[in-house]
Amino acid sequence: QVQLVQSGPEVKKPGASLRVSCKTSGYIFTKFALHWVRQAPGQGLEWMGWINPGNGNTRYSQKLHDRVSISSDTSASTVSLELSGLRSEDTAIYFCARDSFGPTGPYNWFDPWGQGTLITVSA
Amino acid sequence: DIQMTQSPSSLSASVGDRVTITCRASENIANYLNWYQQQPGKVPKPLIYGTSILLSGVPSRFSGSGSGTEFTLTISSLQPEDFATYYCQESYRSRLFGQGTKVEVK
């Protein structure tokens, strides 16, 4: 079955960078876009960006575009998220999620999701 | 970026109630609208894609409608397992989410 397994929780200092990985299995890695979403404590879902592992193309949210980078390693079927210049507001659970599409129309949604990685930014 | 706005931010309802959540997009997104349900401490679960297409296993009490900039998620008869937070998401340009609607016990 399709699985997305993320790296473990981390504590980071303000100003540092984070790197979270998402290892995929159970499907052809290059056929589906992968996204990163975060959720601060008690808050909603925030889409951060995506990568097309087939060609390496990326797109980032306007809010984070100057601090975020998403990369992929086809040989390892793994996508990674890097976020620089961390501040306390970046404390959140970070999720990877795969695009899915069905037989009806040109639509995409997120399924499955990784289990989430808690990143805590604290001095 | 497209802005997605949900209303209300929260609502209180009882089992058996009909519940409606609205999602508005800042520009025309045709039918590129998804809905998710998130229980506390859990990963979001997709419910509906393409505005109104129910994913496999989603109860028929859930329905979606709308087009362009205004969309609705309706739960026809609220069940105990439906108390959760619901998010809309556009898939027209990127994958931006609304801010969520928490459905609480009245």
Image (cartoon, helix red, strand yellow):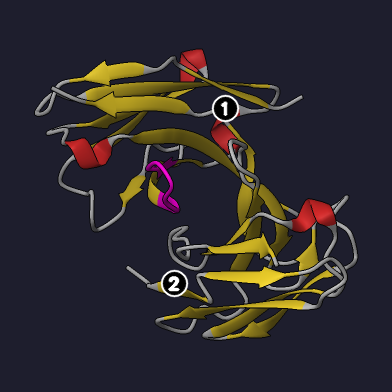
Above or below, B58 relative to B45: below
Q: Where's residue B43, x and y in %?
A: 61, 38
Instruction: For label 1, count other residues whose C-alpha is less than 10 Å away and answer few (under 14), some (14-19) or many (20+).
Output: many
**Number of numbered discs overlaid on the protein picture:** 2
Would you identify the image quadrant in which residue A68 lies?
A: top left
Chain letter of the residue beneath label 1 in the structure image:
A
Q: Where's residue B63, x and y in %?
A: 79, 72
Question: Which residue, given by chain and number where applicable, does mark 1 sit on?
Answer: A115
The numbered dot on residue B4 is 2
Q: Residue at x 33, y 16 (%)?
A: A10
Q: Which residues are magenta?
A: A37-46
Q: Where's residue B2, x and y in %?
A: 37, 72
Above or below, A110 relative to B47: above
Task: Determine the CA span between mark 1 and mark 2.
Answer: 25 Å
Above or below, A79 relative to A88: above
Q: Where's residue B4, x and y in %?
A: 44, 72
A68 and B77: which is toward the camera = B77
Residue type of the residue flagged with mark 1: Gln
Instruction: For label 2, count other residues whose C-alpha is less than 10 Å away and answer few (under 14), some (14-19) or many (20+).
Output: many
User: Would residue B23 be found to the left or right of residue B78 on screen?
Assistant: left
Residue type of the residue flagged with mark 2: Met
